[in-house]
């Protein structure tokens, strides 16, 4: 007989929160009512199910580095790029469409002179360029609609932004440019937890539009491979190899990556144990799926192969013991000594 469901739900949330948060360490969980516990546990089971069945992961990335050129000059170049010099339609925070080279130039002037304004040169970012992407085969209109809803939820406080959906590559993606200063003058300063929330919210909006999408950390899925930057991707497409780019990890790097996943393995193990102790059949089935999922993780497959040990002479304990009847006098001389 399994444990009570309320106990299983509490254990599931305890270890599930550790598994899906970064870093992988325990934080004091808020007190929940019985109804709240059931609701949160239901969401956790749904997230586990999405992860176990390999639901496509969203990508949300800030593409302009803090160390790169900033100011209106850089903003102007990026707006021209995402609009393909006016050939690709932009949409702003009010839902207004911006099409054509002249309309893009008007937008540039509005951003430069309106509101708090954007200086021609700056030592810090005045606009965040955000890339929202999904794997090839995803419905492009759904990605565009989800990006629109995501931007309204995250930046719909009067902050100026525009976005453009690109259809010239296999993976549907949207370029979103958001002014750093809001209407009250406060500047955006996204941290890791903000980027994680952006991914989760974008995935939620995709699901609202009928696209099965997930937002989990690479470590949670045992993924160690990082995708090359856009510059490296373009160089490889031209047949060029970057001087300081290494495509294959060494055994030491793979072993370090495996050790870095110790906390992940522990969390998955405890989630599986909790589900296996449930009286609900689907929970126990999920526990078995977790075992298979962890075994198939890329970090497990990339573990260094141990070197073969040289053969050694058998020890005394390894040597075959002679038959009692073959010994002289029918007794083992070692025993007599």
Image: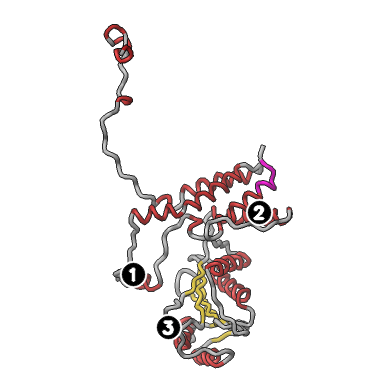
The part of the chain drawn in magenta is 3-8
Give whichever of discs 3 and 2 has the lower sequence position: 2
Q: Nearer the viewer, residue 279 or 54?
A: 279
Instruction: Assign a secondary structure to mark 3.
Output: loop
- Mark 2 = which residue? 41
Report which quarter residue 2 is drawn in.
top right
Across and down, in percent, residue 108 comes to 51, 90
The label nearer to you, 1 versus 3, is 3
The C terminus sits in image quarter:
top left
Tell me the mark number nearer the camera, choosing from 2 and 1.
2
Q: Could you tell me residue 221's position as x and y percent?
A: 49, 55
According to the image, label 1 marks what residue? Answer: 236
> For numbered disc 1, what is the local secondary structure?
helix
Q: Residue at x 55, y 44 (%)?
A: 288
Q: In the current view of this chain or complex, which residue is farthest to the top? A: 329
Marks 3, 2: nearer the viewer: 3
Do the CB atoms of the residues marked 3 and 2 lie less than 8 Å apart?
A: no
| Image coords of residue 131 (percent x, y) | 50, 73
**N-terminal-most mark, 2 or 1:** 2
Decide whether residue 179 is among the magenta residues: no
């Amino acid at each position: 007989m399994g444990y009570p469901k309320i106990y299983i739900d509490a254990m599931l949330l305890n270890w599930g929160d550790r598994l899906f948060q970064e870093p992988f360490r325990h934080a004091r969980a808020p007190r929940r009512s019985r109804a709240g516990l059931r609701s949160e546990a239901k969401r956790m089971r749904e997230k586990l199910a999405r992860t176990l069945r390999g639901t496509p992961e969203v990508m949300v990335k800030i593409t302009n580095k803090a160390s790169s050129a900033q100011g209106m000059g850089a903003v102007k170049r990026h707006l021209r790029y995402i609009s393909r010099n006016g050939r690709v339609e932009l949409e702003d925070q009010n839902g207004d469409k911006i099409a054509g080279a002249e309309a893009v130039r008007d937008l540039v002037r509005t951003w430069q002179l309106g509101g708090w304004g954007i200086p021609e040169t700056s030592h810090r970012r005045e606009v965040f360029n955000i890339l929202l992407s999904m794997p090839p085969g995803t419905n492009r209109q759904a990605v565009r609609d989800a990006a629109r809803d995501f931007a309204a939820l995250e930046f719909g406080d009067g902050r100026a932004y525009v976005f453009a959906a690109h259809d010239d590559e296999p993976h549907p993606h949207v370029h979103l440019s958001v002014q750093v200063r809001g209407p009250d003058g406060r500047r955006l300063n996204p941290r890791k937890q903000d980027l994680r929330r952006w991914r989760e919210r974008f995935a939620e909006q995709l699901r609202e539009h009928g696209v099965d999408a997930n937002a989990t950390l690479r470590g949670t899925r045992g993924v160690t491979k990082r995708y090359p930057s856009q510059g490296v991707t373009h160089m490889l497409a031209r047949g060029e190899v970057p001087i300081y780019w290494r495509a294959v990890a060494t055994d030491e790097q793979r072993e370090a990556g495996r050790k870095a996943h110790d906390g992940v393995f522990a969390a998955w193990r405890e989630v599986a144990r909790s589900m296996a102790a449930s009286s609900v059949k689907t929970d126990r089935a999920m526990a078995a799926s977790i075992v298979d999922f962890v075994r198939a993780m890329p970090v497990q497959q990339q573990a260094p192969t141990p070197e073969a040990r040289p053969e050694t002479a058998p020890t005394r304990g390894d040597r075959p013991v002679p038959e009692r009847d073959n010994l002289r006098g029918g007794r083992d001389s070692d025993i007599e000594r």
